[in-house]
Image: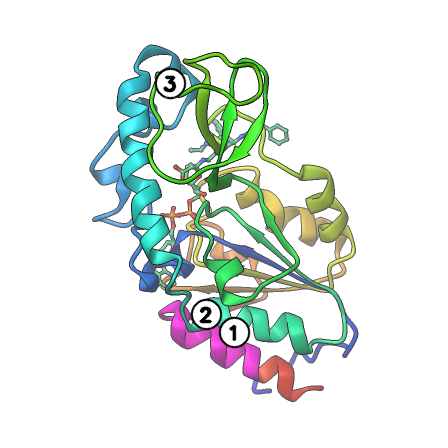
Amino acid sequence: MPQSFTPEKNSNIVILTGAGISQESGLETFRDPDGIWSKVRLEDVATPEAFAKNPHDVHSFYNMRRERHRVATANPNHAHMALARLEAQWLGQVTVITQNVDSLHESGGTQNLIHMHGVHSKARCNHCQHIVSWEGDMSTETLCDGCGDAGGMRPHVVWFGETPLELGRIQAALVECDLFLSIGTSGNVYPAAGFISVVQKIGRAHTVELNLEPSLGAELFDEGRYGPATDVVPSYVDELLETL
Ligand code: BJW
């Protein structure tokens, strides 16, 4: 490979992904100039306080997003598929941690996947915490299968101020990581934006950012590959697989 770093063949790879990896599948990012937060205030739709105050607006925002994501799920792009190819062929462990709530990694073929901000394809009851698969719209009238109540059903996603999912599994993967890739994320949202610092502090992994442009924490990475995910991710995966 052109870079000086060559991973051991059975090394562990951890890959953090964000909205940028799904942009070329037709889904909006959050913080780009035409992104979701340029059209709606996150405080109005992506906090537990917003849901308590105005559940109708939160439901209609997520009903619209769920439908867009359902349509896009049929279109994993070359970046999603390259990561699945890496997982299938690499001799060590490959773990994808995604901040995305779409199902494009799954439809691209990734198996070892952590959805740290939840998924659009599930709903949860705020009253009894029962989780169910979900398609279609949700409203304040929707009844929970678990407790039978109306008014508690919400998207199974992580809003600001809520604890991300599977943090124990994530920490275990970061501790064992030899190569850390960050793809399509702006580095604005914690704790995901802090994973690079966790990995650096452990001091074992080579770190690479693959993004359209340098993110907020770009200088923390050992290397950067900049361009659309469908270009830079497949070519980086090819380089890794050529070392086998
Ligand atoms: C391309 C491309 C192409 C474009 N190819 N690239 C002060 C300081 C520090 C922290 C805090 C603070 N105040 C509050 C906090 C904590 C807070 C936080 O981080 N706030 C910041 C705003 C400061 N975090 C939380 O509240 C989190 N919980 C938490 O911290 O719990 C406490 C706790 C922590 C640890 C242990 C125990 C307890 C929860 C955060 C929840 C985030 N939720 C959302 C919504 C999910 C549901 C939904 O989808 O609606 O998650 S917000 C949104 O941002 C979404 C995303 O997953 C997340 C990250 O965005 P992402 O993916 O990076 O997207 P963008 O748009 O920002 O970037 C896209 C990038 O792609 C750009 O760089 C483009 O250039 C690039 N790109 N096209 C390649 N084609």
Q: Mark 2 belongs to which amino acid? A: Ala
Q: Mark 3 belongs to which amino acid? A: Phe
* Apparent side of residue 157 relative to residue 171 in the rendered image (left or right): left
- Say which of 23 and 60 sits in front: 60
Quadrant (top left/top right/bottom left/bottom right) for the C terminus: bottom right
The mark nearer the N terminus, 3 or 2, is 3
Q: Is 234 one of the magenta-colored residues?
A: yes
Q: CA distance from mark 3 to mark 2?
A: 34 Å
Question: What residue is disc 3 on?
Answer: 51
* Quarter of image, res 3: bottom right
What residue do we see at 23% from left, 32% from top? 40
Asked whether disc 1 touches disc 2, contact meaning CB atoms under 8 Å apart, the reply is: yes
Q: Secondary structure at mark 3?
A: helix
Question: What residue is disc 2 on?
Answer: 79
Q: CA distance from mark 1 to mark 3?
A: 37 Å
Is the residue marked 2 within 8 Å of ligand 1, measured from its CB?
yes
Q: Give the numbered dot on residue 82.
A: 1
Quadrant (top left/top right/bottom left/bottom right) for the N terminus: bottom right
- Say which of 22 and 128 sits in front: 128
Residue 149 at x, y = what percent? 48, 12
Q: Mark 1 belongs to which amino acid? A: Ala
